[in-house]
Amino acid sequence: MNLNFLKGKSILITGGTGSIGSALVHRLIKTNCKVIRIMSNDENGLYELSRQLNLSSYAFDNFSKDMKKNKIRFFLGDVRDKKRCKKISKGVDIVIHAAALKHVSIVEYNPIEAYQTNVIGTKNMIEASIKNKVSKFLLISTDKVVSPSSHMGKTKAMAEKMIFHRKKKSFTKISIIRFGNVLGSRGSVVPNFIKLLLNKKDITVTDKKMVRFVMSINEAINSVIKSISLMKGNEIFISKSMKCFRIFDLAKALINYFQKSKKNKNKINISNRYSGEKYEEELYSKDEIPLITIKKNLFIISKIKVNQSLKTQKLLKKYRVSNYNFLSQKQIINYLKRSELL
């Protein structure tokens, strides 16, 4: 992927200590961008990331000589704080807004907190970016915004709507990228299942019918960078490379992979669904299909209807819901190996 468009750019990553944010830092530090600003309300996360990068984590605002020698800047701050957002985004060219409350079960019991972070926090960052004449702003969203059944999905859908239906034009180009489940991210199902199996514990699956769109962290990062290079504003980007599998099939595949003795077989327990969970996820709604073009392995949703061939229309209908072309257990293991999760 050609990354010359990042040359000399100052980049701000909110939620920069999370799985996606920190992976972006590790990728972008190898490019010819000018500066990477990492914003997080997780003090220890900033410290640990600085250790991973072999950098000093002090002088968050008043840059020390040590910090000036490299591209990284650490900022302790919360997207709920509008003044802090304005200060940290000043002089920035690109904002990647990854800060969010994302765990469905936790957000269900803390909906007001989710609203404050996912909606108000996004609003604060957008307004700060516009005021500071940031060139590009990309919101990292989720497939759970389509026909949302959870508070997490609903708050992220509100954030999307706030961006996609903005009437005022600005210098800042603002777009969205939707992810499925990112395998290997903190709290995601694969590392959780592997940890249980290594500790000889049984796996609990919500329902045998539960299906999810999945992507590796590398695929997610590639999609973000590609979207930034292509974005013109007011688009929603979705990676076409996402896979689908049943969570029950994942559990069986991992049990077979780690099983050393047939006598000591781990069990799969079936539990009730969390409040707000869906059996299937959707990448885009039926109403969005006429607005989609396909470019560089991305579905791109715009505000204007596009001319689509019959072949494209059929393809879009097939990809929309996570109920097609499930990976087999063997394919799941091979996919996890390619994604360096096994």
Image (cartoon, rainbow, N blue to C red):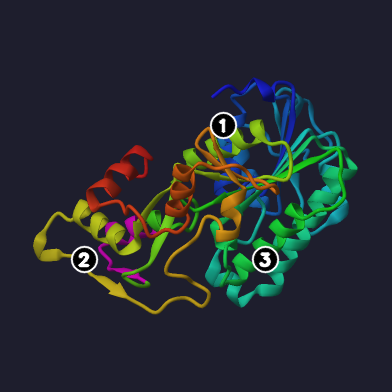
Q: Quadrant of residue 321?
A: bottom left
Query: What residue is shown with label 2?
Result: 266
Which mark sits nearer the N-terminus, 1 or 2? 1
Q: Hey, what amino acid is under mark 3?
A: Thr
Instruction: State which mark lies toward you, 2 or 3.
Output: 3
Is 194 within the magenta? Answer: yes
Residue at 67 percent across and 53 percent down: it is 99
What is the quadrant of the N terminus in the image?
top right
The x and y percentages for residue 141 are 62, 53
Q: Which residue corresponds to the image point at 69% horizontal and 39% vertical from the top-left? A: 57
From this view, report whether residue 73 is shown above or below residue 146. Answer: above
Residue at figure coordinates x 50%, y 60% from the top left: 282
- The span picked out in magenta is 192-205
The Cα–Cα distance between marks 2 and 3, rounded to whole angstroms, is: 37 Å
Task: Specify whether residue 183 is in view.
Answer: no
Is residue 323 shown left or right of residue 22? left
Q: Residues within 10 Å of mark 1 (few under 14, many from 20)?
A: few
252 or 264: nearer the viewer: 252
Report if residue 264 is visible in the image: yes
